[in-house]
Image (cartoon, rainbow, N blue to C red):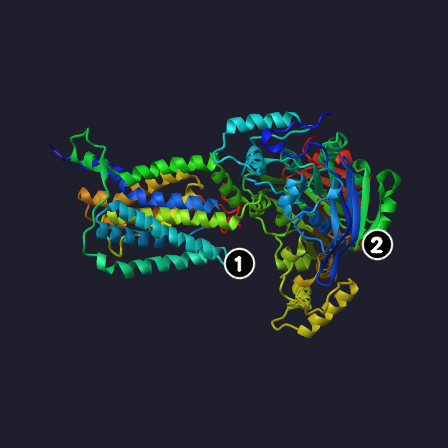
Amino acid sequence: MNGDIGLWAVPLAMIGGAIRVSTPFLFVSLGEVITERSGRINLGLEGTLVFGAMAGYALAYLTGSAWAGVGAAALAGLLFGLVHGLLCSLPKVNDIAIGIALMLLGTGLAFFFGKPFIQPVAPDLPAINLGWWSDLPQVQAALRVNVLFLVGAALAVALAWMLRKTRIGLTLRVVGDSSDAARALGIRPARVRILATAFGGALAGIGGAYLSLFYPGSWNEGISSGQGLIAVALVIFARWSPINAFFAALLFGAAGALGPALQSVGVTQGYYLFYAAPFVLTLIVLVLSSSKSGALTGAPRELSITK
Amino acid sequence: MNAPALPEAASRVRRGAVGIETVGMTMRFGSFTALDAVSIKVRPGSFHALLGENGAGKSTLVKCIMGFYHATSGDLLIDGFDGHVRDPRDAHAKGLGMVYQHFTLVPALTAAENLVISRADVPAVVDWAEELTALRAFMDAMPFRVPLTEPVHRMAAGEKQKLEILKQLYLGRRFLILDEPTSVLTPDEADEVLGHVKALCASGALSVLMITHKFREVTAFADEVTVLRRGRHVGSGLVADLSHADMAAMMMGDARPAAPAARAETSGAPVLELVGIRARDRSGLKEIAIDGLSVRAGEIVGIAGISGNGQMELMEILTGQRATSAGTMRVHGAPYRATRGEERRLKVRYLPEEPLHNACAPRMSVAENIGFRSFEAAGAGTRFWLAPGEMRRRAERLVADYKVKTTSVEAPIAALSGGNVQRAVLSRELDGEVDLLIISNPCFGLDFIAVAEIRSRIMAARNAGAAVLLMSEDLDEILELADRVLVMSEGRIVYECAAAEADIPTLGRHMGGHA
């Protein structure tokens, strides 16, 4: 088969990249949507992501099962989220400062414990070939979709449904919108926030496991290029909606795939500049969604950045 | 009229009104007695008003009834039986409910979501079609209704207050405490809401204990009244037997407020002029549009309106805190951008609402706060080194003049009570020559004595030739002080009249945007 499709390779690689690169964004931002909907902001997710990548890779290597790795990463993330949630429930503790501390702690611990796992090879997560109908290897490569991406997409829908239709969702929205109202209803805001932060941490851990177990698919210290932080910005861009977060993650994934895609078609000059596309996009999004007067619409009113 | 039908989930509590009685209720916090052997009786189906100054013990009493506090001694009877209340949840189970002064609704949720989440037995997965049918059936049995699918933050204050009361009925509460329920409503809205509450009482569905300081509402709606002063029960009776003067005498005891200052004849040139001002409001979605506003020397112009209709933004424009997109602001004919130099040269002074937060550095001393206008002035020029001795003497003189109660001028201003912070800030702003005074809600949350004194100071400034712009949510305050009344609604001045010709129903209609 003739595999030369010329410049069409760029958009095709970006679609494939969007699916491949977006998964960690998707998990981290879905988790952060839930955390922020409860009125907390967890900036430590970058650290959770890196630690999740290390823990997931290590467990997958030791047990030989990639799914055991994903479980371990989720558990590690859950613990990081719990620590953040518990610390922030103490009086006069600022969630942003704790987040930054946990980001540094998470990456530091991951590097410390991850040293022995840089060389060994762990099993990969399975992928589904949705491109079987095409003869083009590029199409097949682009549509090799990881199971976690599909799980994330389903999770976005499930979380949106949960926020609208269930008691847990309503409780979460009450706590995020007004602590006073929540207390008047007999809800304990601190407990809801701790659980929401723990849930967000677990999802960020899974996002990390995806990094080390599928794409790029190995553990090293430079595995995350700030995805955890970008995902937090994504949540604001997505206006705290899980469905929007899904599309925002795809958009950022596509931007992240721009650099490698150009490189693959032989653009040799300045493609490093295109590697910066997600960061430029982050800045543009934040500037466009900012407002000189008045608070963000749709923001949970208890969020410390909107108060 | 039948007792309103309730959905299955909420109908477990009794259907008829609940009566309560406190017997010798006493509450001590350390050595301070907040409540001293207070006995009141609210008969089932009655509308009972609870009157008193700030700090008279009204809140303490209702918190004891609702189980927020445990009374040091004394008993609570519910329907004549011993009704020991362990905590608010226990009070709710016994059919007692409270509507707080500040809304406890969740702004981002719809009315229906607010009602459902407030229930104790929210199902894990909510079937909204079924819930909405049940809620509509409940609403149909009520004398008033609110839109169910509208988010609460888009509702008018009157609708929110109605929803709060509906929520209590929906939850099966049959004795309601209303804490100053009309403080954020227009006169029309207040009359409507209280009229409905009175009808519910008359039908035997509800008993109400309403905390208020508005005599007019007591006379128009309540059956009985109890007056507290300094934690003691000082009088009670049928509303029909008592005049406003009787109630005021009970509330104040021996203290006498300053007589309203006389209004001197004045006429002067325009001092403040706004033309064609346009700015964004806080949400950034609506526009503030002031086509023309002028205040003459020796005149008080009152701006009435319900909070959230652009008064706060107008204050920010006048203080230079909010950018305008068009229009001019002039003081004495000169362009004015509210810089410190202009304020001093043109003698413009401000008294914003909540002065502790908006006009003070709370942890700095009273003397320093009083010095904020003048600390760097040396005659007409400025100084580099501060003059602490001079600042201190000046503060001491003003503290004495304005009767600010403080342990010393070195005490942090945050340690002062609301009325004393207001006096201290007023002393700073009114010291020296004042040509233009811009004021927002100067008497919010203050007691009778402080209110009368602050209003007489404002009137004195007017009589001395200052132009005064007064923004207030308290219509009575505007009618007492202003020479000219403007009404602000939806970011615009929608009505103007001379204070002497002002008519409350007309003003109320314009405030509500219904004219």
A112 on left or right of B391: left
Q: Comparing marks 2 and 1, which lies closer to the viewer?
A: 1
Residue B458 shows up from this direction: no
In the image, B146 versus B353, the foreground residue is B146
Mark 2 residue type: Pro
* Circle 1 residue: A91
Q: Quadrant of the C terminus of chain B?
A: top right
Residue in the picture at 27% in, 37% down:
A15
Give percent across and percent down for residue B443. Answer: 73, 51
Residue drawn where x is 87% and y is 56% of the image: B254
Q: Residues within 10 Å of mark 2 (few under 14, many from 20)?
A: some
Q: Residue at x 62, y 44 (%)?
A: B89
Q: Is residue B266 left or right of residue A223?
A: right
Q: Residue furthest front?
A: B81
Amino acid residing under circle 1: Pro
Dot 1, how many residues are within 10 Å of its Cα: few (below 14), some (14-19), or many (20+)? few
Q: Chain of mark 1?
A: A
Q: CB atoms at circles 2 and 1 under 8 Å apart?
A: no
- Give the percent coordinates (x, y) of residue B408: 72, 69
Residue B467, x across and y down, in percent: 74, 51
